[in-house]
Amino acid sequence: MKDVVIIGGGILGTSLAHWLARLYDGDICVLEKEDRVAPHASSRNTGVLHRPFYLDPAKKRVFAKSSSLMYGIWKDYAAKNGLPWLEVGTLEIAVEEEQYKQLEKYLEWGEANGIDKKDLSLLSRSEVKNSEPNVECVAALHCKSDTAVDYGRFTEQLKMDAEANGAKFILNSHVKLVKEEDGYVGVYVKNLSKPILSKLMINCAGGNSIDIAHMLSIGKEYTDLHFRGEYWIADQPYASIVNTNIYSVPRHPSFPFLDPHWIIRVDGTRQIGPNAVPVAGPHAYEGMAIDANELISKIMEMLQGGTRKLVLNPEFLSLLWDEWMSSLSKDAMIKRAQRLVPKLKSEYFTRKGIAGIRSPVIDNTGNFVPDTIELEGSHTYHILNYNSPGATGAPAYAAYVISRLENAKMLNLPRKNKQSDIWNFEQIISYFD
């Protein structure tokens, strides 16, 4: 009998294991369906450590605080463990005059979220041109301390730390069924003859988290869609056309599609993207090849409830068509990106970058859910819709979740002796009070 089983070995699941093994005497186990941790969203994101200037400190309080707190902790952790850390900065640009007010709001939010004033400034068009002559905008918010990192390597290091404190990671463990019994949870893993029994199960399985919750008839009012975001790598010598991350004020804030942005990766490569290719599963990184049963299941799901209402929304259909067309054509992608950097040309990009899958959650009214969803069962806790900037704040958010589990009396394990270093649990959770 395990004390805690965590389903999902991404950066969030590994962060939870890191804290649990550090804080408690108990049998902590992580089940990851692949042969290593962080193989999906945690390694297939943009690799940006985001400062929270674009997060409303009231409506996005937990995410804003998590991201703000983790900047210094990640910086120290990277230095201690020899992990790459490349501060490149971000320009959040207003392409149209009416977007200027949003930049002013971002400046206010950033300061409220604890970003030092020396790291955050509002620039005029001419000031942007002085630093980035190939960027076209009305104005921009410059965040100097946005940083390129490798979240996959961060997760691997957290795993090693968790294992050193006694946590177990069982890889190649594809969960096929979860049952809640009296006093425990049975987790049935493919190729294992007996279920893994646990007093508490935490579901943070990313693109599969809705499916895990539905096995227990939890969160049936929610479903998800999957969109593959693809990037293109700028060839040399064109990579130096812009030397800062470039984002733009979103044109479609009602929908969780990212407008094109220019990203500097931790290895120094420059990439432009993403588009949004509709796919039937959370791991369809190439082409349209998907499991037939998965496709049939997703189509049946879309024919009922909130997804059916969404796909009848004219604005959504129009946006989907635009995104779909750009996914089929590199030229169309670059044309959209020329709103930010007019000098970009399709021939500057001959290689595809890393593709990732975004799995937005939809409620039964047909609306995208903007926030992370936390749902409780008798002996289970489910974290759904954990999206950007989830990797940035994952360990702080994991501490917040553990504090909630303690307060709800779902986690009853003896505490270990306190350890004082950058991973100060009490100090971190006090930040959320």
Image (cartoon, rainbow, N blue to C red):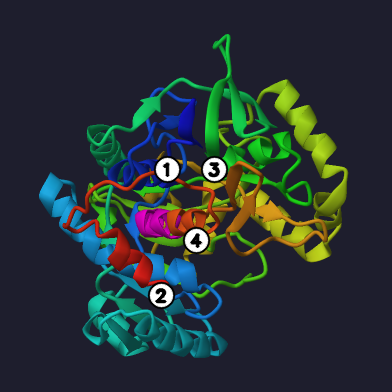
Residue that carries the numbered disc 2 in the rendered image: 92
The secondary structure type at the circle numbered 2 is strand
Left or right relative to 256: residue 3 = left
Give the CA separation, mark 4 to mark 2: 12 Å
> Mark 4 Cα within 10 Å, few/some/many (few <14, many 20+)?
many
Magenta stretch encompasses residue 32? no
Q: Which mark lies nearer to you, 4 or 1?
A: 1
Q: Which mark lies nearer to you, 2 or 1?
A: 1
Marks 3,4: beta carbons within 8 A: no
The image quadrant that residue 175 belongs to is top right
> Mark 1 Cα within 10 Å, few/some/many (few <14, many 20+)?
some
Q: Which residues are magenta?
A: 389-400
One can see residue 135 in this view? no
Q: Position of residue 169 (x, y in %)?
A: 37, 28
Which image quadrant: the C terminus?
Answer: bottom left
The secondary structure type at the circle numbered 3 is helix
Residue in the picture at 25% in, 60% down: 424
Q: Which mark lies nearer to you, 2 or 3?
A: 3
Give the CA separation, mark 4 to mark 1: 16 Å
The secondary structure type at the circle numbered 4 is loop
Q: Amino acid at mark 3?
A: Gly
Along the line of sight, which residue is nearer the eye, 396 or 25?
A: 25
Q: Which mark lies nearer to you, 1 or 3?
A: 3
Give the CA separation, mark 2 to mark 3: 27 Å
Left or right relative to 340: residue 270 = left
